[in-house]
Image (cartoon, grey):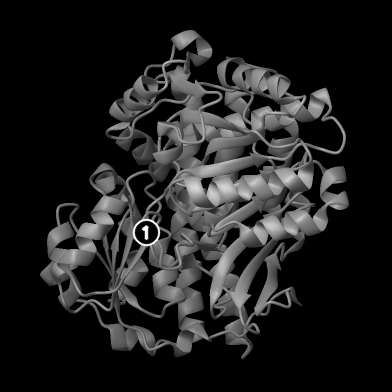
Amino acid sequence: MKTQEAIDRLDPIAWRDTSAQDKLDLLRQLQDNLWEQVEDLAVTDNQSKGYPVENGSYGYLFGLGYQGTSALMGGVIAGIVELYESLVKGEMLRPLAQHDNGDGTWDVQVFPRSAQDRIMFPDRQDWLRVRGRPTQEIPTTRPGGIIGILGAGNYSSSIEMVKALFLENCVVVHKPHELNQETDHVWEKVFAPLVERKALSFLDASESRALTADDRLTKLYFTGGAETARAIMEATDTPLLSECGGNNPCIIVPGDRPWTDKEIAHQALHIATMAKVNGGAVCGRPQTLVTSRRWPQRKAFLDALEKALLEDTPASKTYYPGSKQVFEAFKDAHPHAKVLLPEGGRIEDAEFLFIPDAGEESYAVKHEAFTQVLDEVALAVPAEPEAFLEAAVAFCNDKLLGTLGSVILVDDDTLEAHRKAVDKAVTDLNYGTVGVNTMPPFAFMSPWLIWGGHEAGGPFVSGRGNFGNTLCLRNAEKSIMFSSFVSPGHMLSTNKKAWLHFSRRAAYHAAHPSWFEFARLMGTALREQVRKKDF
């Protein structure tokens, strides 16, 4: 569909005035439709990335087709269903707890909310940091309007559609990235009830210029490169909400005690798994590891990480346009880098570039990879938690490109002994998401948190504004996540079939989060975790 026709057919006033009950009914229809389309979404998502779905060697990658479409969308819809169930009762869904930080900000706990959450993530706590005393808006009272969404290329599940419709109270015109045109046709089936209500239109992938130039839009949502976002802002006066990536740090805190061999292996798998997801094309994935050069276990940790990347996690096919050129640029800039070939190179385009000791002023520090590249910067500071954290935060804020997401890995004993120093680091890190023992992309996946940069008037790199915030808290500034050091909720990929089977069940559970589906999901998780390496 073309832009003129797509916007002509929308009715923002009717949508704005639709009752909470009617919107809740529509959300439940979306859940039913999503359930019916789980398999087609996974297939088309994999085909769009060029994965040969008929080849059994690539079955592991097929799991991401479930995770990146139905599981992601279903989780967001389920959160918004909970919000609207409360609104139908005449109540606003409330936070779980809140804490005055004494500096004009408050931390508001938003997760875990349900019994299922607490079983799956028993040690996880998610918080939103807000400016001023926490207050909420009722989404159905927002003035509405028309939001144009320019979909991302690295995932085809445009969860921004649901957020704009049900949290912003706006109608939506959605344009997919060229890579995801075919998957968008399946999404049209899922969202058919909203199309019929004149609340949503789908565009052809070629309609970028026409969409951004249409002055009927209230706002634009964009996920992609900073250069493209700048071009959009120069071409239109329509406000742009954008997420544009960056070089995300993983701060490795030297402990008061040595890490055990099990802890070293766990964190190596934790990092390697996230570094390979989607061929490295994940906006919030850690790229730069920040260590202390004086940490006695630094070599043991880097050796374990190299082993995890090469031997202990499956190969992941790189597909995103331009990735090969980026890979070569990083390799040329760092001649000492290690080119790793997981699974002996049997999977095409699955090379991984590991750059230990990259240097504080290196090419790797100043550029975003958005592909299978991981670098390490060793700071010449004492291997003492508080001194190291202060130096690491300053390095990340001053040297690394962007402000999207960061993670601090710290053992539980050290965290307990130095909680004030860790909390200060969480506050001082100039990033939109800070995870303590939790990877930043989980904030993107959450309906409760916000996702976006934290530039506060600085150079435009990671974008402006943020997405999410199902509790509709005013002045939300940062997502903060805590979990334990060796958490059962960590994503560790060590078996292809296990990942595939768990991902499929996760997709169906997200579409219909019943106790029956939850039991099937947890049963799969327990069964599959005993599988040995199969690659």
| Circle 1 residue | 459
In the rendered view, does 57 fall on the left or right side of 379?
left
459 and 2: which one is in front? 459
Locate residue 517, reporting x and y percent. Answer: 65, 50
- Residue 169: name its quadrant: bottom left
In the rendered view, does 430 fall on the left or right side of 263?
left
292 and 252: which one is in front? 292
**Amino acid type, residue under disc 1 in the picture:** Pro
Locate residue 419, reporting x and y percent. Answer: 81, 56
Residue 266, above or below 22:
above
Residue 297, above or below 424:
above
Q: Circle 1 — which element?
A: loop
- Residue at point 41% right, 40% down? 366
Locate residue 276, reporting x and y percent. Answer: 51, 31
Quadrant, the N terminus: bottom left
- Residue at point 27% right, 33% down? 322
Crowding at mark 1 (Cα within 10 Å: few <14, some 14-19, many 20+): few
Residue 386 appears in the rendering: yes
Locate residue 230, reporting x and y percent. Answer: 25, 59
In the rendered view, does 250 fall on the left or right side of 201?
right
Residue 19, above or below 534:
below
262 and 67: which one is in front? 262
